[in-house]
Every structure is written in C-alpha cells, then in structure tokens.
Amino acid sequence: MRKFNFIFLLAVLGIGIASPILGAQVFEFEVSPAEVRSLDRLTVSPFISITPDKGDLATYFVGETIVLNYRSDRRGYVSIFDYLPSGKARILRNNEPISPGFERTLRGTVSEPEGTEKFLMVVTSRVIPDRLLIEAMTNPSRILEILGEDTLINQCTIQVAQRRAKSPTFIRFDRLPAEISSGSKVRLSATLTDAEGRALVNREVRWEVNQGTVDQPLTVTNSFGQVEVWFYAPSVTEPTYVYLRASFPGDHIYQESYAEIELQLIPQKIKTFLSLTPQSFHLASGESLDFEVYLEDAQGEAVADRSILWSANVGSWEKEITYTNSQGKASNRWFAPMVETSQTVELKAEFAGVRNLLPAQGFALGTVSPVQVYSGKSYYILDFSSGQVDTNFDSIFYQGDLVSGFALNPAQTLALKKGEVLELDFTLTQPVKRGALYLWGKSDSPAKITIYLNQQPIFSSPTAEGIISPLETNVIYLTDYLYLGRNRLKIEAWPEHAAGAFLIQRILIVF
C-alpha cells in the first residue's frame, strides 16, 4: 500500500479499471501523532464497511498481497485514506462513485516500514475538492467539520511485519512430582524461553492430557515466561501412567515448541478388615482347633488371592502363610502346647497390605490348661426335643420360647432372641482328664453367641444357619475355669435382626 500500485476491480461489471493514481506519483502527507490517535475516537457508520481479506487487526508481512473489501448501503462518493506506520498518509481512492449494495475491491502489495497501518473510508453525498480531502485526511479529528456532518465513516487496521527466520523456543516443566495419588489434584508449572534462555512473555501455551483434566486448557505466560495449571487426576485401581503435553503454537517471530511429561498415578489405598474366628477359645494341652479368616475391603467386597500370615505367642500353626480364596476366606489349624498350668494364648492373623490395599489384622484370645478337670457326674444333659425340659443339671434358667420346625427330625427347640440367655448350674467333685461341651444349635438368620463359664467368656463366634441335624454340633472344650464344686454355664444369643433367633435343641457336657 505504500509506494505500490493499486488496481480497482469493479465487481459488478467484472471489468478492471485503473486506479486514479495508477501510473501517477503517489503523494504522501505528514499527519501529527495526535491526529493519528484521534482515528480511534471517530464514530463509525453501520451503513459502510472496509475490511482486509485476513480480517481487522491481522498481521501482513512485507511483500504480501492485501485485498481491501469495501461497500456502502448509501449512494455517494467514496474516498479511502491510508495512514502509514511512518506517520504519513495518502489517498487511495478519490471521489469514486458508489451505488448501494455493491462491494468493491482494492488490491495491493504490502511494503515497509513495520508497524500499525490504518485505512479510513469516507462516503460523501457530493464530490469533494482535492484540497479539502487532503485537509480532512491530515486532520481526521475535524473530518465532519471539513467534509460535512452527513459524511459516513468506517475504518480498519492491520499490523505490518518483516518476514524473519523464526527463533527456536523451548518449554521445560518445573517441580514435577514422582507420583500422584489417584483422584488428587496437583499444581504443574512450565516455562517458555528462547534459545538463549530468555523468558517469552504474554505467549499462549496449550495443555493436553490423555487422562484426567486440567483447569485451563489455554494459558498465557507471565513476566517470567511461566504458566501454571491444576491437573485433576482420574480415579484408578491399578498403577497408571498419564501423558501431559504443553505446547506453544509459535508466532511470526518464534517457532512452535512443546514438551511432554509422564505422570505415574498411584491408586488410593483402600481400607481392609480381617476377622478371625473363633475369637475366643479354651483348649487342653496338646489339642488343636481350626480357625478361619475373612478379608474384605471398605465396600464389603471379598479380597481374594492375598497372603495371610499367622502367628501365636505359644503353640504352633499348621501353616505359616495361607492365601484367601475367591470368597476372601482362608483357614489354618493351631496346635496347643503341653502345659502344666493354665496359660493365656494370643493368636494373630495378618494381611500385610499391598499397593492399593491397607493392612489389617485379626486376633483371637484363649487359654490352654492342663488335662486334669474335676466333675461330679460323667455327663450333664439338657434336651428340649420333646417339648419338655429334660435335664440332669442342678438347676436351669432360660428365656425364650419352645418352637418347632427348626430340626431335621420332629423336635422342639428353644428360641433365644437378642440378649436372651440360658443358664445352667452343675457340680464338679471328681477328677477327670478332659471335658467338653457339645451344643446342637443353629440360627434362623445371621447371629452370634457368647458362652461364659463362671462369668469368664470361653467362646464367642458367629453361628451356622439352617436346620439342626444330629450330626452337626458345636464342640467347646472346657478348661480350668471349672471350679471344684458349683459351676455356672451361660449362653447368650445376639441375632443381627430383631426378629432373628438362635435355636437350641440339646446341650451335653461330658467328662
């Protein structure tokens, strides 16, 4: 547009005609900086328009072709002024007749110097003398005073730049964490510099991530060339790698660049629970008892294929390590030591935890006693099968009701609801080597029973559910909680549901 020729194309007729200044000397006129600034304060008209082919405020390089498209919805005469970055101005169109609705084109080649170039289009109702056009062009703040109040005005702006070899750029990430917890958020920062390490300010940096999200996909560098985003990690159940990319698209001075990082996501550790049953027990020297563990997570799901480590302060386990099955269960047998006096036992089953599961432990407490026990009779029995209380215990006390339908054979059972008890008194007078309690009983829904001997808990465990069979019995070994003389056995039921019950058909104590 400066020191170059323009060709005006009349779009309607399709005929190229020479510009009024084609082949003639182009005259440039000085414009004060204040008058150039006044262009931004002019009121533009919606009835005329002038637009560069790359859009208003676009950047054009020296030597690049530019096309100005202009039109008017009013009949009149068009003049176009060109305000150069050098502080001078010139007339590109001079009193060109224009009809409403017709778009016209002005084409040229961009030339030096670099900077901001503005184009001002005016449409007047009459032909304006050249001296007044020059006066209006050099004094745009008085343009309506000079050309008339009915003058229509519009304008556009371009940036002129010199083509240069683009400088390389580099992006580096700062303070990268080695690991990120699943579902967490972390602040990530990156710095954009040129080849000499100088910060590039006010440049766009775009962010992409294959998993998770960032709070700002587009950021702008600060005065130190830095940008920051919050990265929100997705929730994962296994160790996962996430790839994040920061890229600078480049501009007319600097080349594009990008940097990628790999972030390792660590699953959140889930709490686990381990239950060991039975939780309490009483054995004689040299006896053994089977134990079972159940391992579950915080959602109540069974945890399968995990190792369980077994330990005891006395005695020995059949296996040191077992593994949970698909239902989260594992079993082991414990062998009581030979003792001369009663000894307290603490058994432990332990899950050590893995990367995404927290550890858990279960305990059982019991005693091991010498083999000698005293008894007044060879056995004591209590039986509800006939619907009557058949017993040789010294005395009995029970709560609950006698009901039918819970035994394999036609038989009555005692139904103990939540908190109800059965108490039995018996007497020991003679020494025996070993004694045990046999209990025929099951529950109609999930339940737990606790058995006390002389006010000491000797057994506590969840109960089996279903129909009572003569071949299925709970065996609880009696220990030196037995006294010479009068003893009291107490059975307490704790169903999970208010309507549930623990059902007892028969109890037998043998020595």
Image (cartoon, grey):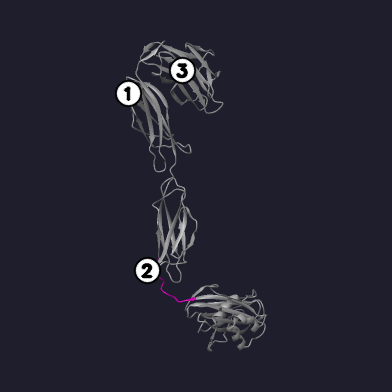
Residue 165 magenta: yes
Q: Can see residue 472?
A: no
Badge 2, how many Cα within 10 Å: few under 14, some, many 20+? few
Precedes in sequence: disc 1 or disc 2: 2
The circle on residue 188 is: none
Label 3 or label 2, whichever comes before in sequence order = 2
Q: Residue at x 55, y 81 (%)?
A: 82
Cα separation between marks 3 and 1: 26 Å
**Mark 1 neighbour class, 10 Å CA radius: few under 14, some 14 to 19, many 20 or more:** some
For mark 1, give the secondary structure: loop
Label 1: which residue? 337
Q: Earlier in the sequence, mark 3 or mark 1?
A: 1
Splitting the image into 4 quarters, where does residue 336 fall?
Answer: top left
Q: Which residue is mark 3?
A: 489
- Image coordinates of residue 400 in percent, x first then y, are 55, 19
- Asked whether residue 222 is drawn in magenta, I would say no
Pick the front one: 237 or 423: 423
- Camera-side residue of 107 and 413: 413
Number of disc labels: 3
Where is 242 relative to 3, above or below? above
How far apart marks 3 and 2 lie (CA) works out to: 89 Å
Q: Secondary structure at mark 3?
A: strand
Q: Which mark is residue 196?
A: 2
- Counting from the top left corner in percent of width and height, residue 157 is at 55, 75
Residue at 64%, 86% in the rendered image: 128
Residue kind at label 2, given as amino acid type: Glu
Point out the image quarter for the C terminus.
top left
Residue type, mark 1 in image:
Pro
Magenta segment boundaries in residue numbering: 160-169
Q: Pinpoint residue 225: horizontal percent, then vertical percent.
A: 43, 64
Distance of label 1 from label 2 (alpha carbons): 78 Å
